[in-house]
Image: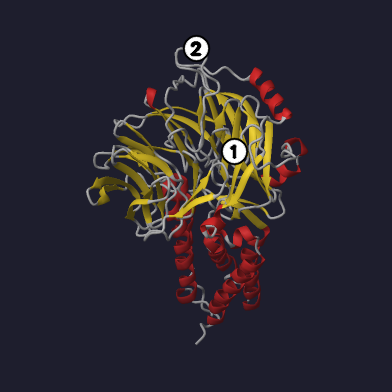
Amino acid sequence: METPAHTPLRLWPGVVAAVLLVLVRVVLPAVWPEQTLVAVGGGLAGAAVILVWWLFFSRARWADRLGVLLLTVVGLGATWFAADVSISTGAMGGLLPMLALPPLTLALVVWALATSYLSVGARRGTMAATILLACGAWTLVKTGGFDQSFDNDLMWRWAQTPEDRLVADSAAALPSPPAAQPTTVPAAPVAEAASAAASDEATLPTIKNANGSPADARAEWPGFRGPGRDGIVRGARIDTDWSRQPPAELWRRKVGPGWSSFAVHGHAIYTQEQRGDDEIVASYSLSTGKPLWSHRDAVRFWESNGGAGPRATPTLANGRVYTLGGTGVLNALDARTGALVWSRNAAADAHAQTPMWGFAGSPLVVGDVVIVATSGTLVGYDIATGKPRWVGPQHTLSDGGSYSSPQRVTIHGVEQVVLLSEAGATSVTPDGQVLWEHPLRGTPILQPVLIAEDDLLIHVMSLDGAQGIRRLVVRQESNGWTATERWTSNGLKTISSDFVVHNGYAFGFDGTIFACIDLTDGTRKWKGGRYGSGQVMLLPDQNLLLIVSEEGELALVSATPDKYTELAKVPAIDGKTWNHPVLVGNILLVRNGEEMVAFRLASAK
């Protein structure tokens, strides 16, 4: 039976629900950023409450109640088909409801308040227009992805992205690859690249030791997170009084999207990026940012959450640079010229599908083998020829993807390579033989860290919600290897932000806030400082942490367990910054998906 025409709407429950929705979805993340995911869920819950109010407690005519529901389903369905692919596929297909439902239901409450005394026909017409406009508006925008706080980079659908502008800018063009693509390392570098490097060397800023004497400007950063793949910069001592001597900008240059960091050797830096339909490996001058050479592959990786571009970082070894692209293209290039030595499709070699967020593991060179992770499978290649030597491991944990890089460790005197996958932790010898494995369901992104002769720290986003750091004890027994958990701590819970270990403590991100835990039992010592989904390096000689926040700020924090102490913070780069920073001597390199910057840090007195 329909509600009589003269019966007024019961508006107050809808108004209360709308106010609560705004408080949870808008106000809560503004004052409590680490609860943003709660706010997203709360926004959806608030939208559901408003719909329940409308359907069962509003006193509206049943035709109007059901009409709102039908129009909402039709409007969202039509919008999903018409929306930009970044909206329709974002957040694994759930982005459109998360974005559209809260404002749509708020619009419903506003409509009910504004039209309660209009005629039935006018109310129904404005109701249909309100819902369809609230849905259709999302066909006019696109997103460049979102950060850990679920803040979407929304723009008009027809607007140029930073990548579009970069590709169209002839002044930002990269050098063409070498004309010849040899299968062996050329005997001499290309003349243009050699002369550019020599010219840049003359203008390279002086890199100094702690005592003020010039250091070796050719100090090497061989790849992802430094020499030990652990984010530790040994021998560096910098002035921490940034109010007096802030980081001095040396150069700033636009760069294509991608979450690659840098490798550095001599006066050349190496990174990966996307430019249109080409995936790029490029070398730039450390002193000026001027491009030296580039290599292109006609492939493109893109997904709506993180955007376009490769995810891994180049690896330098023996005069070559090894790179793994977002779709699985593995290249060996001459580090001085960019000439192609050999190339493989690692995904095809491992019979692996491209994972949702792309291949992200940085290549690891051990002896005469370069090892890459293609999801949960490792492949070892001969560094001279590029031919696969082994593919594996073929064992009970072979299923499951991975966004972590293979890590070289020595446990009980035995050299091994450890990989985290969705099935757990696996250790193999450099020739691919399985030593041990430890099952653990979850999605790994971070590196395992060796903290003692036989103890590893691992972090996995667990499917059962038990996310955090785990201390794993590895033993070599008479009947083989064993791996058992000593403790699990939720004191550090992160997604893609790495942590560092110093003097018996781990320092890293707990959500969007920085924290410290005791490695004895995993208890948290302190938590403070909001840096989003940033990255961190350790300068152990000064008990100092250098943090790059997700918003592109540089911060110095004391690496001590007694309390959180921020020593300095300055802006460095604009835009979402997930890439790992690099410090070579006193030259700091920072990049994100739009630009890269070099700073000179003053040496400690």
Q: Which element type, helix, strand or loop, lies under badge 1?
A: strand
Are the residues tagged 1 and 2 within 8 Å (C-beta)? no
Percent position of residue 530, x then y: 43, 39
Percent position of residue 342, x then y: 62, 45
Number of the label disc, if any, that sits on residue 271: 1
* In this view, 163 is above or below 122: above
- Relative depth, front residue between 437 and 539: 437
**From this viewpoint, is residue 151 visible?**
no
Estimate how packed mark 2 is, as few (under 14), some (14 to 19) or many (20 or more) residues with alpha carbons within 10 Å: few
Number of the label disc, if any, that sits on residue 371: none
Percent position of residue 44, x then y: 47, 62
- Relative depth, front residue between 504 and 102: 504
**From this viewpoint, is residue 402 visible?**
yes
Type of amino acid at the residue the image marks with label 2 = Ser
Percent position of residue 326, x then y: 58, 51
* In this view, 87 is above or below 532: below
**Residue picked out by circle 2:** 213
Q: Which element type, helix, strand or loop, lies under badge 2?
A: loop
Give the mark nearest the N terminus, 1 or 2. Answer: 2
Estimate how packed mark 1 is, as few (under 14), some (14 to 19) or many (20 or more) residues with alpha carbons within 10 Å: many
Residue drawn where x is 39% and y is 56% of the image:
442
| 379 lies left or right of 190 | left
Distance of mark 1 from mark 2, alpha carbons? 29 Å
Residue drawn where x is 57% and y is 17% of the image:
206
In this view, the residue farthest toward the bottom is: 1
Q: Quadrant of the C terminus?
A: top left
Type of amino acid at the residue the image marks with label 1 = Thr
